[in-house]
């Protein structure tokens, strides 16, 4: 199923020269009646993309040695251990990563500039990443957090970035012992082409089709491959996903059982000396990549690199389905 959305354009002017998304343009946009109608269309679309995830208990972390078929660990890193009990309240999760079209609508509505990327090669590549409406928007943690918070403002719902416990629970089809967050828990490839994930060949072919210069680094449409059993797409690749949590390699040994939120304060620094937030999913899918229990981390401000492979998926912390 290929999903097409109506263009959500505003009648306000938005600067084509970009900076960080929190910087307003010189003139705050005034919203016409037509703009308000487009906002309601946008809100309807956002709500329609939410998947209700009934809460429950599960064992979070690398379950391979205790419950895997081969009784071997799936993740060689220590930070996915120990296996520990988590109890989650019900919530909803977007079936898709936030799209370029959705994120650009948010920027335009708020009179915000996008990220400025200079240089012939970097600027060209960045524009290629954001020009196709239904591919994921690429953002740092702060941009992702502000976008989800704004969804809360315009919908009246408690939107936020998901916790990594929520993400893993959904990726594992409500906490089942699922290795890959695909339609059947496996990664299937035939003749270099992905069946339930995307491969390097798939991305190269899509880049060629769309005239992108990115080749195998090209983002893909958000419904390019089938969703997992809950109906959630792209959990095995097409961009890392920012989590709400600060990253702590020892967090699983002290995690609370009920609705863990991650450390209250930043804990772990990367090699460049920056504190890190949790990432889940994968930049590009492939064999052995994007597994449900594997944890990643990155500087929330994406210093000194552009967030060319970082995306956002928002959650709604509400006990019932969103209507």
Image (spheres, rainbow, N blue to C red):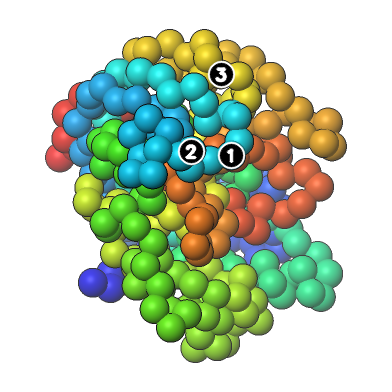
Q: Residue 5 in the image: x percent, y percent?
A: 31, 68
Q: Is residue 142 above or below residue 46?
A: above
Marks 1 and 3: in contact by CB < 8 Å? Answer: no
Q: Disc 2 marks which residue?
A: 73
Mark 3 is surrounded, within 10 Å at the Cα level, by few (under 14), some (14 to 19) or many (20 or more) other residues, namely some
Bin the neighbour count of mark 2 within 10 Å (Cα to Cα): few under 14, some 14-19, many 20 and up.
some
Callout 2 secondary element: loop
Residue bearing mark 3:
251
Left or right relative to 95: residue 213: right
Figure check: 127 above or below 77: below
Q: Residue at x 31, y 53 (%)?
A: 185
Q: Is residue 39 visible?
A: no
- Secondary structure, mark 3, is helix
Q: Residue at x 38, y 51 (%)?
A: 180
Q: Are marks 2 and 3 in contact (CB under 8 Å)?
A: no
Task: Check contact, mark 1 vs mark 2: CB within 8 A.
Answer: yes
Residue 27 drawn at (x, y percent): 62, 50
Quadrant of the snapshot with the N terminus: bottom left
Identify the mark at residue 96; answer none if there is no mark.
none
What whole-number distance in Å separates the C-alpha atoms at marks 3 and 1? 17 Å
Q: State the residue position of label 1.
A: 76
Residue 115 position in % (x across, y down): 68, 55
Q: Residues within 10 Å of mark 1 (few under 14, many from 20)?
A: few
Q: CA distance from mark 1 to mark 2?
A: 7 Å
Query: Who's the residue at 67% across and 39% down the image?
Result: 298
Rounded to the nearest angstrom, the CA distance separating label 2 from label 3 is 19 Å
Foreground label between 2 and 3: 2
Q: Going from the N terminus, do you reach mark 2 or mark 3 first? A: 2
């Amino acid at each position: 199923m290929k999903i097409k959305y109506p263009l959500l354009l505003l009648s306000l002017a938005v600067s084509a020269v970009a900076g960080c998304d929190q910087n307003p343009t010189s003139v705050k946009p005034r919203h016409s009646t037509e703009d308000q109608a487009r906002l309601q269309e946008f809100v309807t679309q956002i709500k329609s993309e939410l998947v209700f995830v009934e809460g429950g208990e599960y064992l979070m972390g690398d379950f391979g040695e205790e419950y895997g078929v081969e009784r071997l660990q799936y993740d060689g890193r220590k930070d996915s251990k120990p296996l520990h009990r988590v109890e989650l309240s019900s919530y909803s999760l977007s079936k898709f990563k936030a799209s370029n079209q959705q994120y650009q609508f948010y920027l335009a509505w708020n009179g915000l500039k996008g990220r400025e990327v200079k240089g012939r090669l970097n600027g060209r590549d960045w524009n290629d990443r954001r020009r196709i409406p239904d591919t994921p928007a690429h953002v740092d943690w702060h941009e992702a957090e502000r976008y989800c918070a704004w969804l809360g403002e315009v919908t009246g719902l408690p939107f936020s970035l998901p916790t990594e416990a929520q993400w893993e629970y959904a990726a594992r089809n409500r906490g089942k012992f699922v290795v890959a967050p695909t339609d059947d828990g496996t990664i299937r490839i035939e003749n270099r082409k992905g069946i339930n994930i995307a491969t390097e060949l798939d991305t190269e072919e899509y880049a060629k089709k769309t005239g992108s210069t990115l080749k195998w680094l090209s983002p893909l449409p958000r419904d390019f491959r089938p969703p997992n059993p809950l109906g959630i797409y792209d959990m095995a690749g097409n961009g890392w996903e920012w989590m709400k949590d600060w990253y702590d390699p020892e967090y699983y040994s002290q995690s609370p059982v009920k609705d863990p939120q991650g450390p209250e304060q930043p804990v772990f620094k990367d090699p460049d000396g920056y504190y890190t937030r949790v990432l889940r999913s994968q930049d590009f899918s492939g064999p052995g990549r994007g597994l449900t229990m594997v944890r990643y981390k990155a500087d929330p401000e994406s210093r000194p690199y552009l967030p060319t492979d970082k995306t956002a998926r928002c959650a709604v912390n509400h006990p019932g389905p969103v209507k």
